[in-house]
Image (cartoon, rainbow, N blue to C red):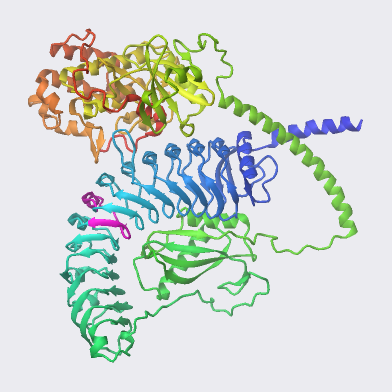
Amino acid sequence: MTSRIFLCFLVVWIHVLAIAAWTNPEDFVSLQSLKDSWQNVPPNWAGSDPCGSHWEGIGCSNSRVISITLSSMSLSGQLSGDIQTLYELQTLDLSYNKELTGPLPQSIGKLTKLSNLILVGCSFSGPIPDSIGSLTQLVFLSLNSNKFIGGIPATIGNLTKLYWLDLADNQLTGNIPVSSGSKPGLDMLVHTKHFHFGKNQLSGEVPARLFHSNLTLIHLLIENNKFTGKIPDTLGLVQTMEVLRLDRNLLSGSVPQNINNLTHVNELHISNNNLDGLLPNLTGMNVLNYLDMSNNSFNASDFPSWIPSLQSLTTLVMENTQLQGSVPAKLFSLYQLQTVILRNNKLNGSLQIESTYSNQLQLIDVQRNIIESFTQNPQYRFQIMLAGNPFCNEGGDGTEDYCIKSQQTETYSTPPDNCLPTECSSKNQISTPTCKCAFPYTGNLVFRAPSFSNLGNRTTYETLQKSLLLSFQKRPLPVDSVSLSNPTKNLDDYLVIHLQVFPSSQDYFNRTGVSGIGFVLSNQTFKPPSSFGPFFFIGEGYKYFDGAFTESKKATSTGIIVGAAVGGSVLAILALIIGIYAFRQKKRAEDAAKRSDPFASWNSNKHSGAVPQLTGARFFSFEELKKWTNNFSETNNIGTGGYGKVYRGTLPNGEFVAIKRALQVSMQGAHEFKTEIELLSRVHHKNVVGLVGFCFDQAEQMLVYEYIPNGTLSDGLSGKTGIRLDWMRRLKIAIGAARGLQYLHDLVNPPIIHRDIKSNNILLDERLNAKVADFGLSKLLGDSGRGHITTQVKGTMGYMDPEYYMTNQLTEKSDVYSFGVVLLEIVTGKVPIEKGRYIVREVRTAMDKTKDMYNLQEILDPAVRSGASSRSLEKFVDITLKCVEEEGVNRPTMNEVVKEIENIMEIAGLNPNAESASTSETYEGANKGHHPYTDESLFVYSGAYPPSKVEPK
């Protein structure tokens, strides 16, 4: 009887849990996995309903987890890849947990709604995963102060909504990636305001293509790296720049003259490089506060006459810059001047300081020059350092303060607020500025480029304190007061200030309070006074949460009895929870198995290898492909991409195939893989690349394509393949690609919208027939009757349909727009977007229909300009510009495009229905270009290239 009652209770309890739970089950499983991976999680992470139970640090909306904010929780462990199923997650802040280690999982790229990823001050290691480029909603990316290695992923260039990019203080190597053709780069981040890459091991030249007039950067911080070569002239195009740190690198050559065009720069650091030539003239930088050009190899010159005209200057540092002659007295009369450091030069004559010197002046350091005289004035309230000059060594007695080398240091600490400090009895408690005893939250504020140099000015710190307190209390957060202490300049020339934040109402913070404070400081919600410049914060783990110091009391006999009763109940409930958890874990494992092998239900024929669900494509075993590639020998290797290697194989019937073998780290999700091969297997047309088969065997993932020897259209137009593409051949390629796309739209059932038409996805066979490739982004239109699909915007910058971008409604006319851009490439030979130039806008601007060839001669590719008749060229441009109309309703269908290109071919004297007889075999180097199957985008689904802007108008 008792067992029946318990069983009934169990059943009812399970139903109650299921009904009452507010949290999506998948989200709970993900959080449970994180909990299992970490130590020191908040104590209230219990039960199976994180949203309903208000787990600390977890934010929810409509039963889905949308934020994880666990700053300064002393978490330890690794970040589980199971986080990928938190599909609605928008904010992940794990900042200041120094014991969080290990790599960042590739699966983090599945969190496609993430807008804030904040991991500053942890100890994550390994390379930054390329999949981070899939987080196209990301606005704030802070990975600084970790242990990341490897290069900066080029895919970050896809994050076109990014505002803040901080990768500083890691161990990153290699170049700064810039875009090339369809490959992304950081030059595509036209809306990003902050590039913080300092304190790494980045090398190579600072790429000139990184900078262009469309960038809106305000902070470029690349100090403390190993960059070589010249400062690129293009830097002068970024008119929004405010803080520029290029110091502590290996840069050489002269400073470009047009850097003077950066009229908004208030801090310029180019010290500790190998720069030479003339000192730059910076008269255009009329808001410049801080200038440091020290320790370079500039030509010997007199003190620059333009420096005293910089009315906003607070700090001038020109140590070891080959200065000679005298220091102009009017320099010291600049109203805001605080510090002048000119040591280790050849300045001579008399050091003159007029009576109108700045009342903010704190230091003049001209040690180790050739200064011969100086008259001290007892009214001077600043420090002068003259050691190492003849005046001190010979003329003076050497005992004056200004002949002593040591620099006076001033410190600051927040004083009590009109009260007497309290002597605290508890260990680790500190007297607050309001004279209470409390356990503070502590850490260091690090200011990377303050515009002031006077570290003893109390007003500066008082302003910062008020700003901090206001920022915390506006949230509101339980903060009573803040204290600042020990401001110092470190070896990186950063200003470091120790911060203590004290709780209100009680003497300790709870976890919500600490994570809230950490979030305000980690995601730049707090804006310091502008003179402090860009900053970051490194928090210390908080160890004084409620109850942390409560002494345990000896239990009474009553307590033991109550404890036993409660303990029995807890054990029963615990057993119940364990049972439910085990059930869910089993279900989760089953689901994971299904996700990992979607082919498990496909009963392939042992002999033929045919798969019933595929049309005309085969399943190949690993052993078969191994045999047909001579054990994947290097002699069969026809290329290498980021995903792995591509091999030429020979089937038993003598047919050549291209076998793309993915590296383990490059494999896509199995369901994505299945979707692609099912899609490709249904498509059969001479102008569409054919899928021969696939391999999903022995933990291998391979696609087997027909072998196409002559690369991509993009490679052909750029000359990489060595194949000459005259006007006639370009027309044949255009008609072939158009027919392939027409087939997808009109003859496949249901129709297929390609969604990523571009010159890299049009391949050329041995007869230069065009074949449309890559269906990684394709969508089936279906029979909805709506004529469009509402979907997440994906595609490639420069080819994207503006209407699709604005409405998320994908139609066949979206492909037409992209194809129109390809046609423009065919006639101009130019990539769609380069250095701020957009091909569609450029052609429209230059075109004049009243003139021969529409006045486009300067834009046309030379092969087109010399080979096309005016009439055929003009008609080609007409249909092209119809394809790229802003509104889809005004664009032709692909059927209409095909007919028009056929007419143009007839005008040019070609038979549009003849099989192309052109081959590439007569052209030297035809097979020396990039092989089409080495293009990473053909395996890595090319949603990796969302646009930053459809058309830069």
Magenta-colored stretch includes residue 235: yes
Magenta-colored stretch includes residue 516: no
Q: Nearer the viewer, residue 398 or 592?
A: 398
* Residue 288, image quadrant: bottom left
What is the quadrant of the C terminus in the image?
Answer: top left
Report the side of 492 relative to 830 (left or right): right
Q: Position of residue 825 (x, y in %)?
A: 22, 27
| Outermost residue, right side | 1
Q: Position of residue 45 (x, y in %)?
A: 67, 46
Q: Is residue 57 visible?
A: no
Q: Is residue 587 above or below residue 522?
A: above
Q: Position of residue 276 (x, y in %)?
A: 20, 61
Q: Nearer the viewer, residue 544 or 182?
A: 182
What is the quadrant of the N terminus in the image?
Answer: top right
Report the side of 142 relative to 317 (left or right): right
* Residue 505, image quadrant: bottom right
| Outermost residue, bottom side | 397
Q: Position of residue 414 (x, y in %)?
A: 50, 74
* Residue 722, image quadrant: top left
Q: Is residue 16 above or below residue 332?
A: above
**Start-end of magenta stretch:** 231-252
Q: Nearer the viewer, residue 777 or 524?
A: 777
Q: Is residue 943 above or below residue 192?
A: above
